[in-house]
Amino acid sequence: MSYKKLLAAYEADVQYPDANGMEQLDMLMTRSEIAKHEPHLSDEERQRLLQADKLLRQQAHLFYKSIKDIADLASWRRDEDVPATHWWWYLDVITQMQQQTQSPESNPVYLSP
């Protein structure tokens, strides 16, 4: 599949965070294929990729929710020797970080006496 088709598929996939876990894993593999072709992307394609990535990051918890039912991302990263630069394989970590920054304990409210 050409990188143009991969990009279009990825853009479509990030629109559906409630898809099943297998489809989500396929989306992550598509994103890894796009990474191989990033030097060849035009400026317009780079912008499209950035927007799709932004949507994935914003809804990481929803994508991870589907994936965690069928796969352990930490094991997957280890078994497939996923490079750290492929951040999309770290939806579990991103989700945990987002939850920590949104929890009341991480943002204490100080009341004056």
Image (cartoon, helix red, strand yellow):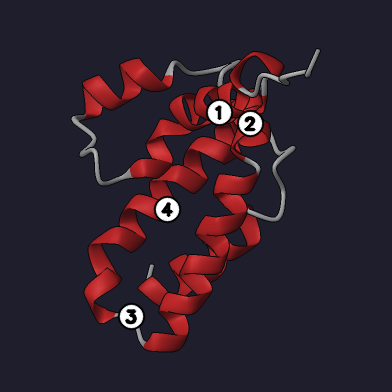
N-terminal label among 4 and 1: 4
| CA separation in Å, label 1 and label 3 | 28 Å
* Residue shown at the point (26%, 69%) measured from the top left: 37
State if disc 3 and disc 1 touch (CB < 8 Å).
Answer: no
Tag 1 and tag 2, C-beta contact below 8 Å = yes
Q: Amino acid at mark 1?
A: Thr
**Number of the front mark, 4 or 1:** 1
Tell me, for residue 61, which label it has, or none: 2
Q: What residue appears at the point 35 percent right and 18 percent down from the top-left corner?
A: 74
The image shows residue 4, relative to residue 35, as above or below, that is below
**Residue identified by numbered label 3:** 41
| Residue type for callout 4 | Thr
Q: Secondary structure at mark 4?
A: helix
Q: Quadrant of the C terminus?
A: top right
**Residue type beneath disc 3:** Leu
Closer mark to the observer between disc 1 and disc 3: 1
Q: CA distance from mark 4 to mark 3?
A: 15 Å
Mark 3 is surrounded, within 10 Å at the Cα level, by few (under 14), some (14 to 19) or many (20 or more) other residues, namely some
* Between marks 3 and 2 in the image, the one whose residue lies nearer the viewer: 2
Q: Image height check: is 18 above or below 58? A: above
State the count of labels. 4
Q: Quadrant of residue 43?
A: bottom left
Checking the image for residue 95, the label placed there is 1
Query: What residue is rendered at 65% in x and 27% in y?
Result: 66
Q: Mark 4 vs mark 2: give the one in front.
A: 2
Amino acid at dot 2:
His
| SS at circle 2 | helix
Q: For label 4, count other residues whose C-alpha is less than 10 Å away and answer few (under 14), some (14-19) or many (20+).
A: some
Rendering coords of residue 33 (x, y %) = 32, 56
| Residue 42, picture quadrant | bottom left
User: Disc 4 designates what residue?
Assistant: 30
Residue drawn at x 24%, y 38% as measured from the top left: 84
